[in-house]
Amino acid sequence: MLRSLFSGISGLRSHQTMLDVTGNNIANVNTTGFKSSQTQFQDALSQVVQNASGAQVGTGGTNPAQVGLGVRVAGVTTNFTQGASQLTGRSTDMMIQGDGFFVVRKGADTFYTRAGGFDFDATGQMVLPGEGALVQGWAAVNGIIDTNSPLTDLRVPAGTLMGAVATTKATYEGNLQSDAANGTVIERAITAYDSTGVERALTLTLTKAAGGWTMTAASGAATASSPLAFTSTGALDVAASTGLTAPGTFALGAVTVDLSKITGFAGVQTIAASTQDGHSAGTLQAFSLGADGTITGSFSNGLKQTVGRIALGSFTNPAGLEKSGGSLFRTTVNSGNAQVGAAGTGGRGGLAGGALEMSNVDLSSEFTNLIIAQRGFQANSRVITTSDELLQELVNLKR
């Protein structure tokens, strides 16, 4: 048989593979997080017709003569360039800006994906729709995240409770007018909380007399009082304010009240209750996503607290990953193990909420490849036809 016949057959097979890859790329032009593939060819074995010879005295060397035996597919590589972003406005849609993959778990297996269109199931678990794969990350404990701890299934269930925290410190600041009229009474209150979240008022009453200002504080059954003295520069004189301890605090039950930022200048009255560190219990109402993957919950008590953080994985050779369907990738021996960490660290990209990464398929390139594959297929089929005609002529020698 003619060698060209088999070369043409190998060309048909290889270009058919190229058509398959190109067709799959075009089919996934609108698939979220899809990464296009490219076909690479290489020549097959070559048959040596004449070996090379070295130069000798009076005779020059000759080059080898070889006839190729066709083509084969060297590989199908994945293109991991960034896809275009599409704004969706959904708080559960997330896009990686840069390198990295979301880490998801399906049964006992761990997969990686660029598709960030997540949803919640009935138990509040963050999942990849269609696959049901569970998004991996770190859960917060009292608003603190330990990224060195093992990955867990991320849960952001509606009604997540933020426990109450008792007030341990309250701060008052501003200026107490030194030239106020005698008999002036100023009352400033701030809401404090006990360990169960029950509110109670913490009231500071300031009275101006001929000898200066006197402070009286009350919170429930707890009371405290002290004269307030100021230096010639307007700073609080703790030594002369006999009821205060350095740097200007006093105890009111279990609460430490800080007056160290109060000044005593003339003509201005700006004394006010500033802050306290307690709060009531609250339930999760909404959440938002930060660029580092931190999920911050907004609670019914008006506070915000970190509830979790999404993990990202990166690879030394992402082209070595194996596509597993469902926009998922699986590690192989040539991809290396995933380096898991927070977004924005270790070469991993940042995250954008309310957006999705679209397919990186370039239709203009794919249709050009379609034409190239089609013409290559046609040319190789013509080689087979021509080889067949030659064989027919050979057979017709004997009539």
Image (cartoon, rainbow, N blue to C red):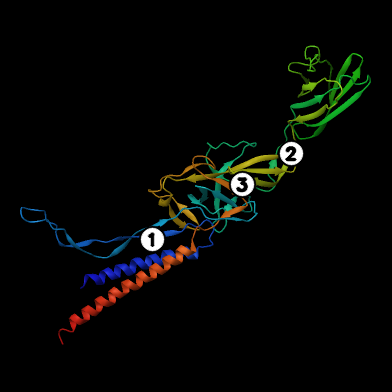
Image coordinates for residue 317, horizontal then vertical, percent = 41, 47
Left or right of residue 203: residue 314: left
The residue mark sitting in front, 1 or 2, is 1
Say whether residue 27 is visible: yes
Left or right of residue 345: residue 22: left
Classify residue 206 by image quadrant. top right
Residue type at mark 3: give it.
Arg
Number of other residues with Cα within 10 Å of mark 3, as a class: few under 14, some 14 to 19, many 20 or more: many
Which residue is the site of mark 2? Answer: 281
Image coordinates for residue 351, horizontal then vertical, percent = 57, 47
Q: Mark 2 or mark 3, which is nearer the start of the sequence?
A: 3
Which residue is the site of mark 3? Answer: 155
- Do callouts 1 and 3 mark residues in contact (Cβ within 8 Å)? no
Left or right of residue 151: residue 51: left
Q: Mark 2 or mark 1, which is nearer the start of the sequence?
A: 1
Image coordinates for residue 56, horizontal then vertical, percent = 7, 53
**Furthest residue toward bottom:** 399
Residue type at mark 2: give it.
Ala
Number of other residues with Cα within 10 Å of mark 2, as a class: few under 14, some 14 to 19, many 20 or more: some
Which residue is the site of mark 1? Answer: 39
Residue type at mark 1: give it.
Thr
Measure the C-alpha gap from mark 3 to mark 2: 19 Å
